[in-house]
Image: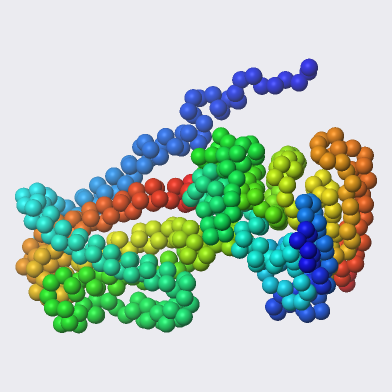
Amino acid sequence: MATETPVRPRPDREEGPGRPAARVRRDLFGVGLWLPATVAVLICGFAWTAVAEDQPYLLPLLPEVGGVLVGDPLLFLSNAWSTLQIALLGVGFGAGTAFVLALVMSEAPVVRRAIMPLAVVLNVTPVVALAPALVVAFGFGMAPKVIVTAIITFFPVLINMTTGLRSVPSPVLHVFSTLHASRLEVLLRLRVPSSLPYALAALRVVFPLSIVGAVVAEFVAAGSSSGLGTMIRTSAATARLEYVYAAIACLAAMGVLMLALITVLERRLLFWHESQQ
Amino acid sequence: MSGDRIEVRGLTKTYEGADPLRPALQNVDLEIPRGRFVSLIGPSGCGKSTLLRVVAGLEEHDTGTVSVFGSTPQNMAAAKAVGLVPQTPALLPWLNVRRNVSLPSRVNRRAGRGSEDPDLLLRMVGLDDSARKYPHELSGGMRQRVAIARAFGIRPDLLLMDEPFSALDEFTREALQLQLLGLWERMSTTVLFVTHSVREAVTLSDTVVVMSARPGRVHEVLHVDLPRPRDRDVVTGPHMHVLEDRVRASLQTAWEAGAAPDDLIPL
């Protein structure tokens, strides 16, 4: 036979894991990934220090912030836990209510027509404006803060779940229809699993938002005695900036941890979804 | 109404907001004896998918009667006697292959209908070593095979298939056609198969119903007298080509019989 078939791989495939795709992958998990971010952080650090040395009432020196954190970790941990509790309870109530309401609304259109306008109004009302009124109603303590957080986390979950429950492709619904599946079976076997990607996407937005809600509630609800938000407020009032920024650092860490949790949850629960491919 | 055939008499259906002079289906008469493999073929808009959905009980019709083995389509669905293979595989992506195939037996248990062993079904479609895989790990052809296995799972009296192979390449398509015939002969059910491929219709069916569009109606009913089982020899033989030409000719006149779509009217 006169045709020549290549016996060896083509040259650009010869360099071991040097194929274009593999090279990029190695770069991503190697230097290319962490170097730019690290450089950016270092630049910010230098800029911060420059400002802090020049204007101590604007920014505290970074070593002072670190010192305060390391010097009394229990203080920050207990306050962080206090804020976290409010955030988690708020998400639990807000997202939980939204989830149940979305299920009911998907099956009973009349409920949707009744509730949706109220939900929209609640969503556009600045929740922080409600906080003082809630303190009057529910007193000092956790209740008004949890309610504020729940309200903030309610709407995104409701909207996403409503869309998600309706995102079952019609061929699948047809198959279930020819099997004469009951509405409950369609809801539990089709709609709820289909809505999971949407629900988790909403939680990804809402978990960090719940921390914001908890902190803001602590700012506004006078007489609050614990929590990182309270610490920020009292420390700012007494110009102890190291405590302010230490608390902010804790809040940032909390937000990152919550997002990491959601990411792990998504990987386990949504292995089948296009978003994870 | 007799229990040994599917009878459609004077069926008319117009979609809401559509031209009432050109219903999706107009005065369709059709009779399908039990155990036959019948294809519906025709130009776009001839109502073949609509007819399938009406027989499935998924859509209401305006006038006429539909009787499926002496019963209404809705009663057949309630008794879980109908299997549907839609155009897309329509598998549940969060379930593995085996659980997808066994799903119909777990839904509507009140119908009390027995089901086929899912492992046996998977073996018959050649996917027994993919039982634990998930739909996103399968190719299009494999997913469609799972959908077919799922439909056969409830041992349906009527199997409805809506262009199930239209998204597959030529060779996969031909392989699946022969595999479907093997399944059909083993499980013996009545099949109503919508396609727009002449070759596919002749390969698979006992009867080819050619429809025309605007309005949707039955143009001609042709019988396919190829011997069964239909293996590769039959399918590549001369009589096959004769039948294909006959169907194609009928399809041509059906195409011309339907009023031309507005955008094809020459200026």
Relative height, residue B179 to residue A233 (above, below): above
Residue A129 x, y percent position in the rendering? 24, 80
Give the residue displayed 31% in from the left and 54% down from the top. Answer: A259
Which of the pair B23/A146 is nearer the observer? B23
In this image, A99 relative to B144: left or right?
Answer: left
Viewer-nearest residue: A166 or B12: B12
Examine the image and state in which quarter residue B187 appears. Answer: top right
Answer with left or right where residue B236 lies relative to residue B79: right
Q: Kindly give the residue lying farthest to the top in the view shown.
A: A1
Q: Is residue A52 visible?
A: no
Whether residue A78 is visible to the viewer of this picture, yes or no, is yes
Measuring from the top left, give residue A78's x and y in whole percent. 11, 57
Which quadrant of the rendered structure holds the N terminus of chain B?
Answer: bottom right
Q: Position of residue B185 (x, y in %)?
A: 75, 43
Residue at position x 52%, y 31% in the image: A19
Give coordinates of residue A39: x percent, y percent. Answer: 29, 45
Q: Quadrant of the C terminus of chain B?
A: bottom right
